[in-house]
Amino acid sequence: MNPYSCHSCQSPIQSPWLQPAPPIVCPPQYRMSDSFLPRMQPVIHPFVNVNREHIVNVPQHFYTETNRNVVVPPPQQAFPMQPGVPFPQQQFFPGPRF
């Protein structure tokens, strides 16, 4: 048997300490349910091709040729040629330098 109810009607006893208190309403809390949808966004990466020509000096050799006529004096003999005596060594006259 419930001590807070009447025997005849079985209704709760109306005492001030058993009365419900006024409700306290808290500020709402939000729960977000995020979803994402893909959307294509073009990203353009331009390339510029540059063809460069470099001038490089490369030596090209040319050779010229000239002819000179030089008269060489005969070797001077200090003694007459004798049979059986070796020929004396000739003196060298260098030609002009280029």
Image (tube, rainbow, N blue to C red):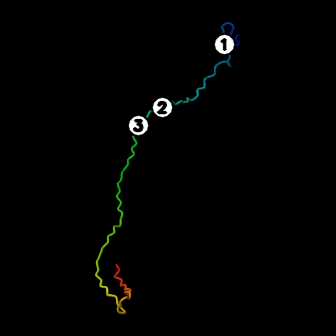
Q: Quadrant of the C terminus?
A: bottom left
Of tags 3 and 1, which is closer to the observer? 3
Q: Give the alpha-carbon distance from disc 1 to disc 2, as whole Å.
A: 51 Å
Looking at this view, name the residue that lies furthest to the top. 8
Q: Which residue is mark 2?
A: 35
How dense is the environment of label 2, judged by Cα within 10 Å: few (below 14), some, or many (20 and up)?
Answer: few
How dense is the environment of label 1, judged by Cα within 10 Å: few (below 14), some, or many (20 and up)?
Answer: few
- What kind of residue is marked 1? Pro
Residue name at image x 39 percent, y 40 percent = 42
Q: Quick one: SS at disc 2?
A: loop
Residue 56: which numbered mark, if any?
Answer: none
Answer yes or no: do the residues labelled 3 and 2 have beta carbons within 8 Å? no
| First along the sequence among labels 1 and 2 | 1
Q: Is residue 53 above or below residue 18?
A: below
Q: Quick one: SS at disc 3?
A: loop
Residue name at image x 35 percent, y 80 percent = 97
- What kind of residue is marked 3? Met
- What kind of residue is marked 2? Ser
Q: Which residue is mark 1?
A: 12
